[in-house]
Image (cartoon, helix red, strand yellow):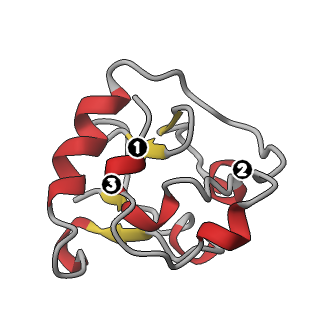
Amino acid sequence: MTFVVTENCIKCKYTDCVEVCPVDCFHEGPNFLVIDPDECIDCTLCEPECPAEAIFSEEELPEGQQQFKQLNAELAKSWPVITEKKAMPADAKEWDGKPDKLKLLER
Protein backbone atom coordinates (compact mmCIF):
# COMPACT_ATOMS: atom_id res chain seq x y z
CA MET A 1 0.00 0.00 0.00
CA THR A 2 1.08 3.57 -0.57
CA PHE A 3 -0.02 7.05 0.31
CA VAL A 4 -1.22 9.46 -2.36
CA VAL A 5 -1.11 13.24 -2.63
CA THR A 6 -4.46 14.50 -3.92
CA GLU A 7 -5.91 17.57 -5.59
CA ASN A 8 -5.95 19.91 -2.60
CA CYS A 9 -2.13 20.05 -2.68
CA ILE A 10 -2.21 21.79 -6.06
CA LYS A 11 -1.17 25.43 -5.60
CA CYS A 12 -0.95 24.90 -1.80
CA LYS A 13 2.19 22.73 -1.85
CA TYR A 14 2.93 22.77 1.85
CA THR A 15 6.09 20.76 2.46
CA ASP A 16 5.66 19.82 6.12
CA CYS A 17 5.18 16.20 5.02
CA VAL A 18 8.60 15.77 3.41
CA GLU A 19 10.51 16.34 6.64
CA VAL A 20 8.96 13.34 8.38
CA CYS A 21 9.33 10.87 5.50
CA PRO A 22 11.96 8.27 6.45
CA VAL A 23 12.49 7.07 2.86
CA ASP A 24 12.46 10.32 0.86
CA CYS A 25 9.55 9.30 -1.37
CA PHE A 26 8.24 12.83 -2.04
CA HIS A 27 8.89 14.49 -5.38
CA GLU A 28 8.35 18.17 -6.12
CA GLY A 29 6.80 19.79 -9.16
CA PRO A 30 6.14 23.46 -9.83
CA ASN A 31 2.91 23.63 -7.79
CA PHE A 32 2.30 20.11 -6.45
CA LEU A 33 3.99 17.30 -4.53
CA VAL A 34 3.69 13.59 -5.27
CA ILE A 35 4.60 10.37 -3.50
CA ASP A 36 6.56 7.67 -5.32
CA PRO A 37 4.54 4.49 -4.72
CA ASP A 38 7.63 2.33 -5.26
CA GLU A 39 9.43 4.11 -2.40
CA CYS A 40 6.57 4.68 0.08
CA ILE A 41 6.70 2.23 3.00
CA ASP A 42 3.23 3.07 4.32
CA CYS A 43 4.59 4.48 7.57
CA THR A 44 1.66 6.95 7.91
CA LEU A 45 3.90 9.77 9.19
CA CYS A 46 3.16 12.20 6.35
CA GLU A 47 -0.63 12.13 6.47
CA PRO A 48 -1.13 14.04 9.75
CA GLU A 49 1.58 16.58 8.83
CA CYS A 50 -0.28 17.92 5.78
CA PRO A 51 -1.98 21.25 6.63
CA ALA A 52 -4.13 20.93 3.49
CA GLU A 53 -5.24 17.39 4.40
CA ALA A 54 -4.29 16.29 0.88
CA ILE A 55 -2.58 12.97 1.70
CA PHE A 56 -4.54 9.72 1.90
CA SER A 57 -3.79 6.02 1.88
CA GLU A 58 -4.57 4.55 -1.53
CA GLU A 59 -7.35 2.52 0.06
CA GLU A 60 -9.02 5.61 1.52
CA LEU A 61 -8.90 8.02 -1.42
CA PRO A 62 -11.90 10.34 -1.36
CA GLU A 63 -14.50 10.04 -4.09
CA GLY A 64 -13.27 11.68 -7.28
CA GLN A 65 -9.60 11.50 -6.28
CA GLN A 66 -8.74 7.99 -7.50
CA GLN A 67 -6.89 9.32 -10.58
CA PHE A 68 -4.28 10.84 -8.29
CA LYS A 69 -2.85 7.41 -7.50
CA GLN A 70 -1.71 7.02 -11.12
CA LEU A 71 -0.75 10.69 -11.37
CA ASN A 72 1.56 10.40 -8.33
CA ALA A 73 3.25 7.34 -9.85
CA GLU A 74 3.67 9.03 -13.23
CA LEU A 75 5.02 12.37 -11.99
CA ALA A 76 7.35 10.81 -9.40
CA LYS A 77 9.34 9.36 -12.30
CA SER A 78 10.23 12.79 -13.69
CA TRP A 79 10.18 15.19 -10.76
CA PRO A 80 13.11 15.57 -8.31
CA VAL A 81 13.05 14.24 -4.75
CA ILE A 82 12.37 16.80 -2.03
CA THR A 83 13.58 16.11 1.53
CA GLU A 84 13.51 19.47 3.29
CA LYS A 85 10.65 21.75 4.20
CA LYS A 86 10.37 24.93 2.15
CA ALA A 87 8.32 28.07 2.64
CA MET A 88 4.75 27.64 1.48
CA PRO A 89 3.57 29.64 -1.53
CA ALA A 90 2.44 33.13 -0.54
CA ASP A 91 -1.12 32.40 -1.66
CA ALA A 92 -1.33 28.83 -0.34
CA LYS A 93 -4.06 29.57 2.19
CA GLU A 94 -6.20 31.17 -0.52
CA TRP A 95 -6.05 27.94 -2.58
CA ASP A 96 -6.58 25.52 0.31
CA GLY A 97 -9.97 23.85 -0.09
CA LYS A 98 -10.80 25.24 -3.54
CA PRO A 99 -12.33 22.61 -5.85
CA ASP A 100 -11.40 21.70 -9.42
CA LYS A 101 -7.69 22.48 -9.20
CA LEU A 102 -6.49 19.60 -11.38
CA LYS A 103 -6.60 21.84 -14.46
CA LEU A 104 -4.11 24.13 -12.69
CA LEU A 105 -1.49 21.40 -12.20
CA GLU A 106 1.82 22.42 -13.73
CA ARG A 107 3.91 19.55 -15.02
Placement of the C terminus among the 4 image quadrants: top left
Q: Residue 41 placed where, x, y %?
A: 38, 51
* Cα gap from disc 2 to disc 1, whole angstroms: 23 Å
Q: Are marks 3 and 1 in contact (CB under 8 Å)?
A: yes
Question: What residue is shown at x 17% (from left), y 45% (from top)?
Answer: 70
What residue would you read off at disc 1? Answer: 105
Q: Residue 31 placed where, x, y %?
A: 55, 42
Between disc 2 and disc 1, whose residue precedes?
2
Q: Nearer the viewer, residue 26 or 104?
A: 104
Residue 37 falls in which quadrant of the image?
A: top left
Question: What residue is shown at x 25% (from left), y 37% (from top)?
Answer: 73
What residue would you read off at disc 3? Answer: 102
- Front tag of 2 and 1: 1
Q: Residues within 10 Å of mark 2 (few under 14, many from 20)?
A: some
Q: Amino acid at mark 3?
A: Leu
What residue would you read off at disc 2? Answer: 19
Q: Nearer the viewer, residue 55 or 1?
A: 55
* Cα gap from disc 3 to disc 1, whole angstroms: 5 Å
Q: Amino acid at mark 1?
A: Leu
| Total numbered labels placed on residues in the image | 3
Residue 71 falls in which quadrant of the image?
A: top left
Question: What residue is shown at x 44% (from left), y 34% (from top)?
Answer: 106
Question: What residue is shown at x 45% (from left), y 63% (from top)?
Answer: 43
SS assignment at label 2: helix
Q: Residue 55 placed where, x, y %?
A: 44, 67
